[in-house]
Amino acid sequence: MSADATIPARVPAPGSRSLRPLVGVLTAMAVSLTGTRVSAIALPWFVLATTGSATMTGVVAFVELAPYVLVKAFTGPVVDRLGPRVVSWTTDAVSAVAAGLVPLLHAFGLLPFWLLLVMVAMIGAARGPGDLAKEVMVAEAADRGRIPMERATGLSGVTERLATTIGPAVGGGLIALLGPMAGLTVNAVAFALGSLVIAVALPRGMGRSAAVPEASGPTTAPTGGGAAAGVAAVDGDRPVGYWRMFREGFAFLRGEPLLLTVIVTVAVTNLLDAAFLTVLVPVWARETGGGPAAIGLTGSAWGIAAVAGSLIAAAVAHRLPRRTVFFVGFLLVGAPRFLVLAMDVPMGLVVAVFVASGFGGGFLNPILGAVQFERVPRHLLGRVNALGDSLAWAGIPLGGLLAGAAVSMAGLIPVLLACGGLYIATTALSGLRPEWREMDRKRGRAQAAAPDASSIPDQKVPGPTAPVAG
């Protein structure tokens, strides 16, 4: 790879300011995430309707999310080396093909359960690097637009929440009218559009490699043999291979107690959220007679409120005390959703609780994203973001699997009550840790020009990624 693919090629000229990069990245995120949210309703409902088994529904969720987490963990150096733009559009194209094959094969009666699992695993494996690449480009887009990091991550949160709002509404409506395969078709089209936006709509030169900063010299092209063998940077006259880049990201990650605490907290709550979304809500909708429409209504109510929260966060979060806002948001977003579904209450009250939960959740990711981008140098974002996200997501594949087994053994209400109690305990105990006081210490200090870890022997550099919460 030529020298113009390093950080200097990614930074706008002095005096210039462009919003096009952020608009392009957010547009690609919007369409691909909306398709994913539609599929998140259509696929579990399809499995539940055809098998009648909460356990098999959990198995499908596990088969999609386990490859997502594993592949994402190991593709950070590839994103840093090849550049997030190439990784994003190629993986979205692969996801589009795999997602499109599911309804096509089903229409011809050629979709046994084992083959559905294979297709779902392919989608998950491709989604991981694609989502990572878009996350990385948010930081570059903020730099180019001279946008405060909380505002950029807040707008990214708005995009995600809009997808969470539109996706359930579209998914519930499509399933009710045309069946779950229509939702999976929408997912394939959305991935294709996301790939097209990244490939052709972003400004020239955006999303190139940032594996080696300017002070470290030029980069070299991959030499073939796959990601592990072919990804190499240059440290003076010595090649820096894939595994060294991976180790640099890991060393960077373990040097920051605050964000390690964040990762552990979010890992537990993500597991509970995965159980909630992939199994507990569909089973609740079936047992109460609400069906897909109830899933769409509650999901959309949550999403609309989360959009409102994210918009407010984008406007004012850079002026608010992060620690206080973070824990109030977690208090609202967590246990109330589980507990209200365990009660025999009117749908209006259920929707009201989801609205309050979504509003609190809208503040979480803008804060976490800003903390991440302030602490991680741009040339390490892919590696560190991949590892941090994967650790925070490690429990997500197990969420649906464990929830399905637990519901089969104990019933829905005991599982909802247990998950709500665990959510409260996790956030309360985590909040006692002293590391949270560091949350406001580096506000506004972006790490775009940080030195290369490979050129500083034995240095412990701070800062893992900020994983997705809520």
Image (cartoon, rainbow, N blue to C red):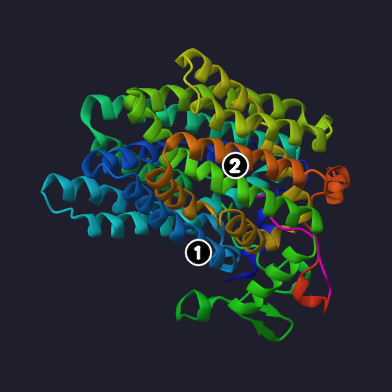
Tell me if 381 is positioned left or right of 99 in this view: right
Question: According to the image, label 1 marks what residue?
Answer: 70
Q: Position of residue 264 (x, y in %)?
A: 68, 54
19 vs 65: above or below? above
Position of 60 with respect to 435 (left or right) is left
Above-or-below relation of 194 to 385: above
**Quarter placement of the N terminus:** bottom right
Residue at 50% across, 64% down: 70
Which of these two is toward me, 116 or 91? Answer: 116
Quadrant for the C terminus, please.
top right
Q: Which mark is residue 21?
A: 2
Q: Is residue 249 above or below residue 196?
A: below
Q: Position of residue 105 (x, y in %)?
A: 17, 51
Please tell me whether the stretch drawn in magenta is mainly helix, strand or loop: loop
Span shown in magenta: 459-470
Q: Quadrant of residue 452?
A: bottom right
Q: CA distance from mark 2 to mark 1?
A: 29 Å
Q: Position of residue 112 (x, y in %)?
A: 18, 55
Answer whether residue 466 is magenta in the image: yes
